Amino acid sequence: MIDPALYTPSKRMRMMTGAFATSSSGSFLVSKEPLTSQSRLPAPVLEGPPTTIPQPDWTSLAMTDQDLESMSKSQLIEAGRMLRQNLGLANQHIAARDGIIESAHATIVLQNVFVERQSEALHAKETKKQSARVRLSMDGVGRHLTSKEWIQKTKDAQDARDAEVVARAQKADEREAARIAKEALEKEWKEAKAAHELAVVAWEEECKKLLSGGSQKKDLPKKPTRPKKPKARELEEPSGPPQEPDSDSDDD
């Protein structure tokens, strides 16, 4: 017997994926191949309440305590038998309806997976990378390769490709600079926290000495202030000329 605690959602997902892969109508849902217009789900099966199971007789619900008290022993036995029979029919109807609900939920899950795959295929089509090639033939007619118009169009296409290469290189440089700045920021922050921790330890030792020497708590030095985490922009060099420090700024 499988431990219910080990029957995790991920295990259920793997079982469902395996079941899809072995079916002829749903294998495309878990395939890595892109969805096409030929990929279709079977039509949903719409089920109603079961008609092959007789409906329970609920007339016994209208019986009162007085009715039961006026019955003989044989009548009570017969009423109990009918009640068990009707409860059995009701149980069959509940089981059938539970199966219908489970089937409907499974259909909704399949349709949801299908819609997600369709969205992925549509997104891939919408964001398909355009070719860097440029059509140089104009108006669908021939052109002289030595004509000024052809030469200019060729030059414009090459300039566009060169500009794209430069832009990609610039973005790569910006990403590298951002990475270096982030590493420097983290290093500066770790050093500031370590220095603050040492200052707090020294402050605690000094307070202990002062208190043991008879000083009042109000006369103790203030606890070192925790430094604020520096921001990335603080690491950047100023764009303008360097400014002279204020005369009243702290040097320590």
Image (tube, rainbow, N blue to C red):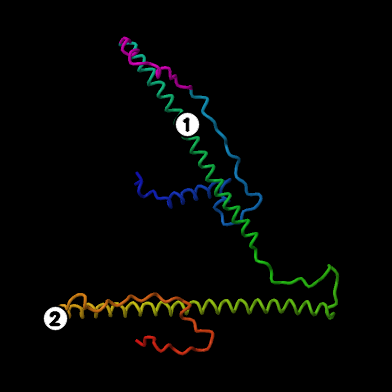
In what element is the residue under mark 2?
loop
Residue 153 falls left or right of residue 104: right
- Residue shown at the point (58%, 76%) measured from the top left: 171
Residue 21, percent from left and from top: 53, 50
Real-space CA distance between mark 2 and mark 1, rounded to the nearest whole angstrom: 87 Å
In reply to whether residue 194 is colored magenta, the answer given is no
In what element is the residue under mark 1?
helix
Number of marks in the rendered image: 2
- Residue shown at the point (52%, 45%) measured from the top left: 109
Residue 68 falls left or right of residue 123: left
- Residue shown at the point (59%, 79%) measured from the top left: 170
Q: Which of 85 and 127 is in front in this view?
A: 127
Residue 167, percent from left and from top: 62, 77
Q: Image quadrant for the C terminus?
A: bottom left
Residue 176 falls left or right of residue 220: right
Q: Give the range drawn in magenta.
A: 54-72
Q: Give, as a three-letter code, the residue at label 1.
A: Ala
Above/below status of 84 relative to 132: above
Mark 1 lies on residue: 96
Few, some or many residues within 10 Å of mark 1 (<14, 14–19, 20+): some
Above/below status of 249 relative to 28: below
Q: Nearer the viewer, residue 101 or 208?
A: 208
Residue 132, percent from left and from top: 69, 71
- Residue shown at the point (66%, 49%) measured from the top left: 38
Q: Give, as a three-letter code, the residue at label 2.
A: Gly
Mark 2 lies on residue: 213
In reply to whether residue 62 is colored magenta, the answer given is yes
Which quadrant of the structure image shows residue 239?
A: bottom right
Q: Which of 39 and 237 is in front in this view?
A: 237
